[in-house]
Amino acid sequence: MIELQDVTKVYNEGRQNAFAAIRGVGITVGNDLTAVFKGPSGSGKTTLLTLIGCLARPTSGRVTLNGETISGLPEKFLTEIRRKTFGFVFQRFNLIRGLSARENVMLPAYPLGLDHAALTRRADELLDHLGLGSKGGLSVEHLSGGEAQRVAIARALVNDPEYVIADEPTANLDTKLTAQFLDIVRTLRAEGKTVIMTSHDPRIWQADIVDRVITLEDGLLTADERGAHAA
Amino acid sequence: MIFHPPILAILLASTLSLVTLVWASGFAARLVRKWDVASGHAGQIALEKRTYLVSTALVFVLALEAVSLILFTENAERMSVLFVGAMCAIGTLNVNAYGFPALILKVALFFGAAVWLIVNHADGLGRDYPLTRFKYGLLIALSPLVVAVAAVQFAYFYNLRADVITSCCSRVFVPNAGGLEADLSSLDPAFALGLLFGGLGVIAVLALAALRWRAGRLAYAAVSLVYFAAGISAVISVVSPYIYEQFHHHCPFCILKPEYGYIGYWLYLPLFVGTSAGLGLGALSLKRTPASLQEALPPFRRRLILTSLAGFGLFGAVALTAILRSNLIMFG
Amino acid sequence: MIRQVARQRYLIDFTLASMMRRKVKNVVLFGVYFLIVFVLASVMLFGSAIRREAALLLANAPEVTVQKLVMGRHDMISGEHLEALSAIRGVRRAEGRLWGYLFDRGNGANYTMMVPPASDTTHAVGPGEAIVGSGIDRVKTIGRNEYLFLIAPSGRFFKFTVKERLPEGSGLVAADLVLISEADYRALFDLPDGVYTDLALSIRNEKEVATILGKAAKAVPNSRFVTRSSIARTYESIFTWREGVLLALLGAAILSFAILAFDKASGLSAEERREIGILKAVGWETSDVLTSKFWEGALISLGAFLIGLIAAYAHVFFFQAGLLEPVLKGWAVLYPDFRLTPHIDPLQVTTLAFFTIVPYTAATIIPIWRAAITDPDTVMR
Ligand SMILES: Nc1ncnc2c1ncn2[C@@H]1O[C@H](COP(=O)(O)OP(=O)(O)OP(=O)(O)O)[C@@H](O)[C@H]1O
Ligand SMILES: [Mg+2]
């Protein structure tokens, strides 16, 4: 369970162009829920995700994970926690070109120094699970958009995180692939993972697997509703 | 003689160390005032990012200083042919008054950098980087040393004149020549051996105390330093004559030569490792163990103690082997 | 511990793959690095090899050599001065020396012919005997019957029994050396009795050299006196000076190399920057990126250093430093044929590493750090 208390995030702090993207947000997420953030462009959805997922430290306020304060931790420890707690899926997939799909999936585990054979097996299992069993050795620039996203999802899952965080996961996908993505989320949800997404896409917030829809405007929470699943 | 390539290399190293440490102390001064690990403000995050640069740069400086120390003695050894009266490093170091001070300062700087990196590592074990202020204070304390090394070393090389007649190990390390070196050589061999091997016993006992009490650790650190000096004295007074198989040849440098199988490195390297670990342990015990290190520090301290013991033990073992293998009979 | 090793292996793997993806950039850097090491190592190896040879040579040289000058040129000197010279107080011994070069038309080699001094009992040779240096065997098959045939400048044939071969010690002193007896030497070169190439004085106390020279100059007019220390100084200054000039030029080269390295390291492509951002976002820490970049630097540095060093070694000792000759050839005036003995000195290698690896590392630390601290959330934009 992640709890944000009165969290703010100021970009370019102390400079002329300082900008408060999140202005005092308090929210609790987790507990096997699928949550979606929506709101106009520039409202701070992505910024809030980086704070929830420990990709960035809040300028002020407190973030706790299962009751333990993690907002004051230096990068080294924050990364340690992030690596085992969160998996990320980015809008632009962000795979590393020139590496194979399998290597991309293994990448987050490199600093852990796990056994190579075991790690390779884990990556292949994940790819297999997502229907990419035959593509493991393929360099990622040869993959289609949907395949690339599934590689990105496999990468997010390689360290077996409790939370999967996805920023605009379907912005680059057509209807069929969006449905496929929602199926994957359904499986993850069934496996007990918490999925937290941002989206502009009504197909996402209206999907039957969504438990909670949160609206952001101007860096503030303006609504927190139950999703189609909960309803 | 400044344009002698190894000298240029040594000066390059000391200039780089100097620039790095002066810059780092400037940063340290800022950090000590502003550091607040729990803050998420831009200033703190920038400071934290910069600490990575400082750590990396200090690893670089330590490596530079370690190699530069070897280069310094090897070069002194090699340049001895250029000075009338010099037969090994001693003669070259004695060409002017700065030689030995430069060497001693360099050794001190090496230990300083090693201790800093040990504290740095320990700091990284605690979730709130509890030793950061202390560590950067230490860094500021180190900067006069690096300035001194650069200055004395430069003075030494700048004043190297080939026309100086110098005195070398055959004259300096002679019991009745007067001066510290002579005192070291005239150290009673039996006493020196006692110091060498008895010291190991004291260290082993203190290691046990160091595992339990902070005072024990501080004592261990102090004794490491003393043992370092004792070890070098013992090398001068007894071990080296055994290695050379000459009763009157007391030289701590000639043993580094290939003729003697580089045995000097086998002696000094463990001794330096043992001392560095011991001193690092001491630095970590100057303050009470911070709350966030209660769990992570004791195993690290144990590792330091073991490393230090292993270093000193190896030093003693190499010395013993050298003595046993020698054909020289000093006692009996 | 095992984890740490495995982590390093993963990071190295990743680094190698990442370097392969940027071949052009890395090849350019590697090439320049290699060149710098190669030139620098060549100069240092060559300079020290020559100094070593010279030191060996000088160790055996007499304190003072007396040469006769005719119209400013070196000529044979008469042995009748020996008595007067040895009478000077402080001169331990005065000896006439016979040495010169014999060009062998058969294989184009130049031999150093020499009569061992009477004081050198270990190399005494009788008439018809010869002691040869290690190089002679290479150019002239002496064979199992141990005969050495030489053609005198006059065209006459001489046959010598090879009594001994000198060990490979110093190429300069021994390789092309042929020691024969005085009688044979005079016959070979058609020399009258009583003349010598030069006279060698050995002196009891080096500090008295100046006084002795004053007296000797009166005893032997029309002559030139070469002292060992003046030769040594000449050597030192020729080599050190030339090497110094070269090193200064190289200093400039090293500096520009460091700037290039800095530039390459800081001028990260957008692609690379994005990659680092991705790594940070998916769970790498600043120190992981630093380590990976450190491996990149180490691979380039050590690779270029080793290959450059080996190439320079081959260049200096197998190809006689062909590329450096025009610059460093001062010594050739003193010794026309000069084969360098392969020799490598750890001190020198360390020094060389200092001049190359250290500037490279120093120049790249800051750009690498800058890249490594990329914020993980940049990839979300
Ligand atoms: N690195 C940055 N520096 C300065 N301002 C930034 C930075 N990142 C984001 N911002 C600003 O913060 C605000 C919130 O950005 P954020 O990306 O969180 O919005 P968003 O809700 O995700 O928008 P979108 O729907 O377009 O993705 C925006 O106004 C943006 O311009
Ligand atoms: Mg966004």
Image (cartoon, coloured by chain):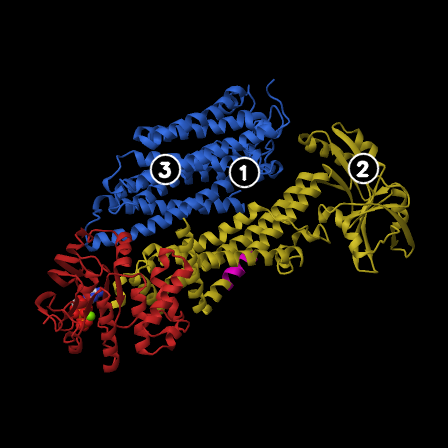
Chain colours: A red, B blue, C yellow
Q: Position of residue B25 (x, y in %)?
A: 31, 44
Q: Residue B76, labelled with which disc?
A: 1
Amino acid on which disc 2 is placed: Thr
Residue interval drawn in magenta: C31-39
Quarter of the image that includes the C terminus of chain A:
bottom left
Amino acid on which disc 1 is placed: Ala
Establish if C103 lies above or below C121: below
- Residues at discs 2 and 3 in contact (Cβ within 8 Å): no
Q: Position of residue C48 (x, y in %)?
A: 61, 48
C37 falls in the magenta region: yes
Please state the chain letter of the residue tagged with numbered disc 3 in the rendered image: B
Task: Identify the element where label 3 is drawn.
Answer: helix
Quarter of the image that includes the N terminus of chain A:
bottom left
Residue C10 appears in which quarter of the rendering?
Answer: bottom left
Q: Nearer the viewer, mark 2 or mark 3?
A: 3
- The one nearer the camera, B96 or A116, is A116
Residue at mark 2 to residue at mark 3: CA–CA distance: 63 Å
Q: Nearer the viewer, mark 1 or mark 3?
A: 3
Task: Identify the element where label 2 is drawn.
Answer: helix
Q: At 34% across and 44% down in the image, what residue appears?
A: B121
Q: Residue B44, labelled with which disc?
A: none
Q: Which residue is mark 2?
A: C122
Residue at mark 2 to residue at mark 1: CA–CA distance: 34 Å
Q: At 23% across and 76% down in the image, what residue appears?
A: A170
Amino acid on which disc 3 is placed: Arg
Q: Indicate yes or no: mark 1 CB to ligand 1 under 8 Å.
A: no
Q: At 61% across and 50% down in the image, what residue appears?
A: C47
Residue C42 can be seen in this image:
yes
Residue B103 can be seen in this image:
no
Task: Identify the element where label 1 is drawn.
Answer: helix
Q: Which residue is mark 3?
A: B302
Answer few, some or many: residues within 10 Å of disc 2's Cα (few below 14, many 20 plus, some between 14 and 19).
few
